[in-house]
Amino acid sequence: MPAIPTLKISISGVRGVVGDSLTPDLLTRFSQAFGTYIGSGRVVLGRDTRTSGEMVRQAVVAGLLSSGCRIADAGVCPTPTVQLLVRHLRAHGGIAITASHNPPEWNALKFVGADALFLSGGRGRELLDIYHQGDYTKARSHRLRGVETVADAVDVHVKAVLDAVGPLPSWCRRKVVIDSCNGAGSIAGPRLLERLGAEVIGINVTPDGSFPRPAEPTAENLQALAAAVREHGADIGFAQDMDADRLAVVAEDGTPIGEERTLLLAIEHVLSRTPGPVVVNLSTTQGVEVVAARYGCRVCRTAVGEANVTAGMQRHRAVIGGEGNGGVIYPAINFARDSLVGMGLILHRLATSGQRVSELAAALPPLEMAKVQFPFPSQRLRDVLRRAAKEYAQYPQDLRDGVKVTLPDGWFLLRGSNTEPVMRVVAEAGDAASARALTESVRAQVEQWAQG
């Protein structure tokens, strides 16, 4: 199998390995293209805590200024904070410097439009066309703008969440452990929890980008959080990824409940108060349909990717939505995956239910998911997906994003990643062993087809 490239350019943005494929020149040119695309207006800039962040920021600032943009620099802050500030400041767009769940050697640019949504579809392709053509707006020296600092960026975000969900009842003070992975949520997460009225214990909340654990907040990466929850007798544990758009939950007994159940708890709380449509992506648990049915609500599904989900939420006027990777999207605050929103909604679910996290999780649909990913060359992707659709032609399929096959006792989704040069397989079944067996069976088939 040929070497896997370390640069990913798509309508989702650009990401790569710093010092290899992600160079200052490429970053500056992409920023010039974005400045040209938005018409040299005001741009909100924010980043996570990766050690490469300042280098990337300098390159982005150079590109934006050279194309005549004004920059509102929010510094280190969660990605959803950047999106919120675009709307709050009435900016022309925003750039979040983050590779989210990728390893520390990666970094990326995520582009936000004037509507505070990530560029996707036709808008993303238009930006790519400008980048490839290389005909960028060039500001004259007398029209070059400056950089202003947004000093209260995190407070704006925290206030927006508090205004929407409200503080916890005084009689329901919860002890919470938060693990921010020393990322962008290290300041915002504890601050929100304190203002909600929780007793907060922080681990990995030094915003230095040192990656004390892998960034993705999956169950196998949360041993330290689980231990801290047990040690302190906490009611709940929260884990964020590096840019604080995803959230994982650990129950009071130290058991991670799974990222899919993060979204289910948030959905159940919102629907119990405000019934309405729910929008999630194709790789999210079928438990969403079960929970929504309890409140007589319908579920609509979209292709994978936050931009696809938020577009679907706007189209269907959803009251809640998100992605099963722990990405809660609550339009009353922001059309963005937001761990701060997730924490607020779930703590209120605990308060209103009077139950423990383990009890709430046990009442959710008894479905289990398994997820695997492996390096895969993009040039073989289309052939393999076509082969998979043909192989499982006798079963119901959804081909909007890869190949999703519904089997008699579960389902699987096979698709290429938008953010990494890998193939992903997600499966769900009635028990964990069956879900794992399904992902491994599909992976073995894909690898065999790739060699053929």
Image (cartoon, rainbow, N blue to C red):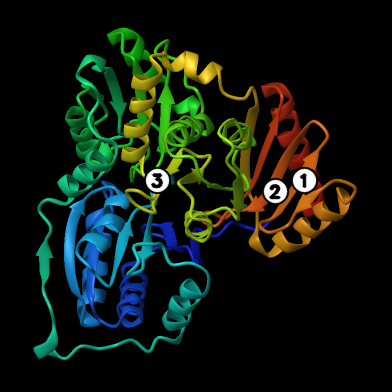
Q: Nearer the viewer, mark 3 or mark 1?
A: 3
Q: How many marks?
A: 3
| Marked residue nearer the N-terminal end (3 or 2) | 3
Residue where numbered disc 2 is placed: 414
Location of residue 409 in the rendering, given as x and y in whole percent from the top left corner: 80, 30
Q: Tell me the quarter of the image containing the N terminus.
A: bottom right
Q: Which residue is mark 1?
A: 405
Q: Marks 2 and 1: which is nearer the front? A: 1
Check if mark 2's residue and mark 1's residue have beta carbons within 8 Å: yes
Q: Position of residue 386 (x, y in %)?
A: 80, 59
* Residue 452 in sight here: no
Residue 202 in the image: x percent, y percent? Answer: 23, 24
Q: Considering the numbered disc 1 on the image, is that residue within a helix, a strand or a loop?
A: strand
Name which of mark 3 and mark 1 comes first in the sequence: 3
Gap between marks 3 and 2 measured at Cα:
27 Å
Q: CA distance from mark 3 to mark 1?
A: 29 Å
Q: Is residue 33 left or right of residue 405?
A: left
Disc 2 and disc 1: Cα gap in Å?
9 Å
